[in-house]
Image (cartoon, coloured by chain):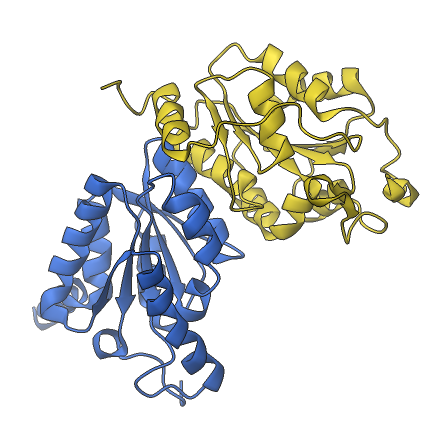
């Protein structure tokens, strides 16, 4: 009995974790194709996506490859989202400006934010500073998620808006939400 | 211009992109999707006769195969062709590994290889004198990859790919001619018509 209670509270905790919210909200919005280039912070999400038969999830060699895949899938009637880290986003300006935006394709991106709030790698701090200026220069919708209590609202509404307005969106997962990656990990 | 004849497997006939594209399009009877990579590759697809199931890229060099993979995964019953230039494929060699791992059997990839960036002034690619793209595809895990010896062999390989148990890649050596037409650069219309052609959208 005690064990069953522990398991059920664990399950409840997973649903209320940031990664549980991403998984459930993707599913509720019928976003089933999730290619990614991994990040340490994204590990529990990637693991749970692989474990859930609803999702077709796999690694790609580059982030723009993943954007190409979900763009093709969208045009053929399937919704997708791409997972990456900050440095991966920095490789996407060309594909966003030449595919997602001009063709009006709702590419949904989750970006694990490196380079701030305790970053130990100087290169990550520099590339992080390019992310929001690139998003703003393309006038792209983007939100930085910092709080668990707002997170489901942000993810759910952003997916729905991306689909309804046929526009890409970037959801930046702050270390304030995920805990981030610290030097001893 | 084809300095890469030095590589052993790549000694096949030098053909023409527009001719090969026309031969492929003439075979399409089942609303097959065709994704044309940037520049001459999609110009010749356009010139071969527009079909609602054609998608023309106007940038994002190297993404013809990934876009086609997305279409193939979303519609496993539809045959999907992707036409890509050699320079474009060099931008995204990793996509061959992704495709090999997912192994969609409804995907046929064609690499138009002239060893040059024709559209920017015919400069040789870094691979032209040294690398064999079909060998790279095989080593990436795509055993169904081969050079087409000539036009008849190209058509035979296309036909063969329709019943293949895995993805197919066909390398064709082509001349240094530019594209035959110019795609109308209207991305929203291209995307919307493609979605209509794939049965995802209904007309307004």
- Point out residue A42 in the picture as x, y percentages from the top left corner: 35, 67
Lateral position of residue A65 relative to residue B200, left or right: right
Quarter containing the N terminus of chain A: bottom left
Res. A77 image quadrant: top left
Q: Residue at x 41, y 28 (%)?
A: B190
Picture colour for chain A: blue
Q: Determine whether A90 is above or below A125 in the image.
A: above
Q: Residue at x 23, y 58 (%)?
A: A22
Lateral position of residue A89 relative to residue A144, left or right: right
Q: Determine whether A95 is above or below B179 in the image.
A: below
- Point out residue B95 in the picture as x, y percentages from the top left corner: 57, 48
Task: Using the image as rendered, state which of residue B204 and residue A146 is in the foreground.
Answer: B204
Picture colour for chain B: yellow
Lateral position of residue B4 relative to residue A184, left or right: right
Q: Residue at x 34, y 41 (%)?
A: A105
Task: Using the image as rendered, state which of residue B4 and residue B171 is in the foreground.
Answer: B4
Q: Is residue B34 visible?
A: yes
Q: Determine whether A9 is above or below B64 in the image.
A: below
Q: Determine whether A117 is above or below A133 in the image.
A: below
Q: Residue at x 71, y 17 (%)?
A: B155
Quarter containing the C terminus of chain A: bottom left
- Point out residue A167 in the picture as x, y percentages from the top left corner: 28, 46
Task: Using the image as rendered, state which of residue A71 and residue B43 is in the foreground.
Answer: B43
- Point out residue B176 in the picture as x, y percentages from the top left corner: 79, 33
Q: How many marks?
A: 0
């Amino acid at each position: 009995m005690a064990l069953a209670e522990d398991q059920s509270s664990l399950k409840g905790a997973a649903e209320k974790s940031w990664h549980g919210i991403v998984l459930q909200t993707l599913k509720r919005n019928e976003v089933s194709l999730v290619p990614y280039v991994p990040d340490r912070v994204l590990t529990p999400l990637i693991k749970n996506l692989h474990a859930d038969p609803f999702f077709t999830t796999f690694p790609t060699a580059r982030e723009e490859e993943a954007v190409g895949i979900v763009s093709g899938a969208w045009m053929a009637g399937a919704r997708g989202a791409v997972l990456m880290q900050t440095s991966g986003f920095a490789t996407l300006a060309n594909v966003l400006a030449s595919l997602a935006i001009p063709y009006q394709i709702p590419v949904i991106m989750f970006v694990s934010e490196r380079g701030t709030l305790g970053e130990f790698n100087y290169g990550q701090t520099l590339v992080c500073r390019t992310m929001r200026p690139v998003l703003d220069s393309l006038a792209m919708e983007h939100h930085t998620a910092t709080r668990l209590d707002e997170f489901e609202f942000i993810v759910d509404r952003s997916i729905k808006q991306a689909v309804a307005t046929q526009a890409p969106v970037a959801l930046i997962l702050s270390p304030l939400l995920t805990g981030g990656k610290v030097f001893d990990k | 211009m084809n300095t890469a004849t030095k590589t052993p497997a790549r000694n096949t006939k030098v053909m023409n992109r527009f001719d090969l594209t026309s031969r492929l399009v003439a075979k399409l009877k089942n609303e097959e999707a065709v994704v044309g990579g940037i520049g001459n590759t999609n110009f010749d697809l356009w010139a071969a006769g527009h079909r609602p199931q054609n998608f023309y890229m106007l940038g994002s060099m190297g993404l013809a195969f990934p876009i086609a993979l997305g279409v193939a995964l979303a519609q496993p019953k539809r045959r999907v062709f992707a036409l890509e230039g050699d320079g474009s494929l060099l931008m995204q060699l990793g996509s061959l590994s992704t495709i090999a791992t997912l192994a969609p059997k409804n995907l046929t990839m064609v690499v138009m290889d002239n060893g040059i960036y024709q559209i920017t002034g015919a400069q040789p690619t870094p691979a032209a004198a040294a690398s064999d793209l079909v060998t790279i595809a095989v080593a990436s895990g795509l055993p169904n990859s081969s050079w087409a010896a000539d036009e008849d062999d190209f058509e035979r390989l296309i036909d063969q790919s329709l019943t293949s148990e895995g993805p197919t890649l066909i390398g064709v050596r082509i001349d240094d001619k530019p594209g035959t037409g110019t795609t109308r650069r209207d991305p929203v219309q291209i995307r919307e018509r493609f979605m209509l052609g794939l049965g995802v959208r209904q007309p307004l």
